[in-house]
C-alpha cells in the first residue's frame, strides 16, 4: 500500500499568533496520541516568515488520513483556527526517490 505524504502550510494572522500556535500544538499532540496509521506528524516553523507553520505528515493510507480528518481533535482544531488563518496550502506529495 502506498503511503500518503501531506505538506500543510498555514500562515496565521498577526493578531492570532499565540492562540493559533496553541491550536497547532494541541493538534500535534492529539494526533500522535490518538490517530492510528500516523507515521509522521511533524510541525515546523518557516525560518523567514514569523507566522508560517508547516506540518509534514506521513500516513499509512488515504483511508487513515481521512479518519484523522473526521476525529474530534481535528474538528476542534478547525474551529479553533476559524478567522485566525491568513493563508493555507495543503499538498499531497508522492515520494519518488
Image (cartoon, rainbow, N blue to C red):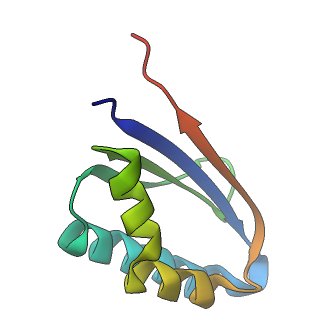
Residues 31 and 53: in front is 31
| Residue at figure coordinates x 33%, y 44% from the top left | 61
- The vertical placement of 7 against 16, above or below, is above
Judge from the rendering whether residue 36 lies leftward or rightward of residue 81; answer left or right.
left
Residues 46 and 27: in front is 27
Q: Position of residue 67 (x, y in %)?
A: 38, 66
Q: Quadrant of the N terminus?
A: top left
| Residue at figure coordinates x 61%, y 89% from the top left | 79
Q: Position of residue 93 (x, y in %)?
A: 53, 32
- The vertical placement of 21 against 76, above or below, is above
Residues 58 and 61: in front is 61
Judge from the rendering whether residue 18 lies leftward or rightward of residue 22; answer left or right.
right
| Residue at figure coordinates x 61%, y 42% from the top left | 91
Q: Quadrant of the C terminus?
A: top left
- The vertical placement of 1 against 24, above or below, is above
Q: Position of residue 70 (x, y in %)?
A: 45, 75
Amino acid at each position: 500500500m502506498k503511503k500518503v505524504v501531506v505538506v500543510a502550510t498555514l500562515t496565521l494572522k498577526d493578531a492570532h499568533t499565540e492562540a493559533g500556535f496553541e491550536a497547532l500544538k494541541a493538534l500535534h499532540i492529539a494526533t500522535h496520541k490518538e490517530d492510528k496509521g500516523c507515521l509522521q506528524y511533524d510541525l515546523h516553523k518557516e525560518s523567514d516568515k514569523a507566522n508560517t507553520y508547516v506540518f509534514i505528515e506521513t500516513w499509512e493510507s488515504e483511508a487513515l488520513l481521512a479518519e484523522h480528518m473526521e476525529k474530534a481533535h481535528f474538528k476542534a482544531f478547525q474551529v479553533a483556527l476559524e478567522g485566525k488563518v491568513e493563508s493555507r496550502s495543503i499538498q499531497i506529495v508522492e515520494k519518488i526517490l
